[in-house]
Image: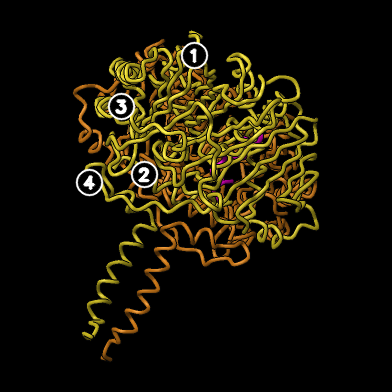
Chain colours: A orange, B yellow
Amino acid sequence: MAKTDWKSEAKSLKKKVKKLKARVMGTEIGAATAAAPKAKKAKPVSPLAPKGGFPKLPLIAGVEFAAVEAGVRYQNRKDVMLVRLAPDTAVAGVFTTSSTRSGCVRDCQTKLAAKVPAGTGAAIIVNSGNSNAFTGKVGDQAVAAVTGSVAEALGIPASRVFSSSTGVIGEPLPYEKITARIPDLVAALREDAIEMAAHAMMTTDTFPKGAAATVQGDGGPIHIAGIAKGSGMIAPDMATMLVYIFTDAKIAPAALQKMLSRNVGATFNSITVDSDTSTSDTLLLAATGKSPAAPVTGAVAKAFESALRDVMRDLAHQVIRDGEGATKFVEIRVTGARDDADAARVAFAIANSPLVKTAIAGQDPNWGRIVAAIGKSGAEADRDRLTIRFGDILVAEKGWRNPKYREEDGAAYMLGEELVIAVDLGLGRAKRSVWTCDLTNRYIEINADYRS
Amino acid sequence: MAKTDWKSEAKSLKKKVKKLKARVMGTEIGAATAAAPKAKKAKPVSPLAPKGGFPKLPLIAGVEFAAVEAGVRYQNRKDVMLVRLAPDTAVAGVFTTSSTRSGCVRDCQTKLAAKVPAGTGAAIIVNSGNSNAFTGKVGDQAVAAVTGSVAEALGIPASRVFSSSTGVIGEPLPYEKITARIPDLVAALREDAIEMAAHAMMTTDTFPKGAAATVQGDGGPIHIAGIAKGSGMIAPDMATMLVYIFTDAKIAPAALQKMLSRNVGATFNSITVDSDTSTSDTLLLAATGKSPAAPVTGAVAKAFESALRDVMRDLAHQVIRDGEGATKFVEIRVTGARDDADAARVAFAIANSPLVKTAIAGQDPNWGRIVAAIGKSGAEADRDRLTIRFGDILVAEKGWRNPKYREEDGAAYMLGEELVIAVDLGLGRAKRSVWTCDLTNRYIEINADYRS
């Protein structure tokens, strides 16, 4: 074995130390330029990812999936996925309210509003790497080209092909890369490829997200299976990221839409990573009606809606668990508000406060910042009626610190990976829970380097 | 000279690399606990600090300053400052609108509302290290004790003693440490100690902030000198951080208050570091009337107000230049909005977007995130009328990227320390400029470690 040259090793290590120090001080970020792209690091999976990996999802009769490598932006990974939905599938959707929403979103909205009969079947096509947002008329043409190609390949009207694009905003979508692969996608369609589809739509996600439920219907089981993508730019406003949920239930489109809309508030509209709302948020729910069970009504409808809400909440929580740079999964639980709007204001003011989120990253039970966030929220609040708890620990009440509260207890609590911060305003009966994550250096790194 | 042991040096460097790597990955922040406080690093001065250090401020006749080390929280530095104002000084103020504002703020508001005649003189006392916010009735008693002691020592009514506290929220203020030093403060009062006072109120600030102006009055010059503290928790709402402005102008309290209130919108209420509003925001303006010039009216009043606004804007900009972790000073300039409210919504949505701010930190001309921020703002916006510029560079117009825009130009522009991001909505004539900074790892470090 050759003798180690410790001198030159020490010199090279010194350089490494210098470089790392610069990075810690944030100066390397300052020195990066878009002109000099850096090699991407392998993404470690979020520490908050559900244990056991992607769940086993039931097959949904009438739904098939495929995914291919089209090279839209990413290389060496699948980046386009196609879903074929059987004839008579009811489709419902909720979308971002952004005034700069993408061409795909506008197109989906127009198609759903047209209420085309479901007899022909339908399809969903999604690409990652480019959001085709703020790409003007060229962007609209790209949507027409992609959905038109899918329609032709599957022999269905373009009015029943829904599309989503997620990734960089403002770059023209190289749609020919997608249309060129549609024959391959169609040839690869399989009932059991939902996990591959979940993978293909990931951008800064570190794991694919899936959730499922089964409900006993009249005459047989009804299955629900959903997938989601989302990690940053997460502050849904009437919808969120990209989410596709499939069921074999028999249910009319109008009833399906109502059920979906009713449950968005307490699920996808109750999560925030960074208070930034995407231009591409899309949530589609498709019901094929292929279950042997009778059409969903009465008690079965209630059970179905409850199971659907569970799947939606599970997927929403997984998005927070994959929040960019997240190391803590945090529930902000507000009670005692004068009305629902105030409860939401307080919950989101806390959940979006950079100072609260950095304190959580530092495992610092800095409840003063929670007080400040409540104060700025604009909601009615009375200092002398406020109660703040970390989990079961009573931190503050009646306008000041609980005399029995010990900082060590708060600090010990903050070491956990799953935290509940509970605030009671003591003014009324309205309440709201929202879910968020901490704000770490990783968030900054991911987002300062995103396009380079 | 002893021979270097390169082997052991290499080994120790390896450990350093490992530690630094962990830090870069954000894991050290995750491992820190409040129970194990770390040694404070020496704070480097913000790279955006005005060159040349603290400006030379004119003496204001009738205003004296003193500062002492009281050890409220910080050691080995001055942390309490006192200002004595001559008899007949008019005082005006604007305060945080937080519903959890501190006892000091409530006390100042009550005293100003009482309109006590100015004949007796007045005083301002400020401590750093503890904000005495959310400390309940004990906090109110602390305010009474501190302002009462100052009143007694100076022989003025307590109703003319204004106080501010800045620092950690929710900890009882050890006010005896302050009252014990009041005789020393009174003994040390000097006309030329304004810089020392600016130092004493710093918390996470990296430099003391001062600004001045002189106006030609009828019969002599009128001077204005102001100081400010603020670095994080900066999103003023009708006021900001701690700011004290002094003038020798002769002007009635009501006119002074109107002038102050009128100019808060375009100055202190147009800056944001992190969208978090402080519980302690206080802006006081004191006019001693000791200038030889005649009372301020007519053209002089106009010139005076304009100079006052310049001082206010200068101090507001310095707060952004000292934004926690800031490496860029950024103006968001919105024009063409339907109305003032929409212009403000768009400007603050961009200025507060973590994704925009991290892109700026990474010197990435990621204008797609600006589009997304406009979209989520809730303001009326039409994709096909939007124009976006970086400085003079036309980036996007009419719903998509300017065909002549070259990414290299945007990237080169982002290397600058002072940036202007201009958005024209193309819908009306309303406009608003706000100032912000980038979001870097340093912000996270400062705020994850703040109390430990």
Check disc 1 and give the amino acid type.
Leu
Q: SS for tag 3?
A: helix
* Viewer-side residue, A175 vs A63: A175
Q: Measured from the top left, where is residue A426 in percent x and y?
A: 37, 13
Report which residue position mark 1 lands on: B112
Alpha carbon separation for disc pair 4 and 2? 13 Å
Q: CA distance from mark 1 to mark 2?
A: 37 Å
Q: Which residues are magenta?
A: B345-359
Q: Is residue B355 magenta?
A: yes
The secondary structure type at the circle numbered 4 is: loop
Q: Is residue A150 magenta?
A: no
User: Disc 3 is attached to a residue of which chain?
Assistant: B
Instruction: Please give the label number shown on residue B430.
Output: none
**Label 1 packing within 10 angstroms: few (<14), some (14-19), many (20+):** some
Q: Residues within 10 Å of mark 2 (few under 14, many from 20)?
A: many
User: Label 4 amino acid?
Assistant: Ala
Report how many numbered discs are placed on residues in the image: 4
* Residue beneath disc 2: B448
Q: Is disc 1 in contact with disc 4, using a CB cutoff of under 8 Å? A: no
**Disc 1 chain ID:** B
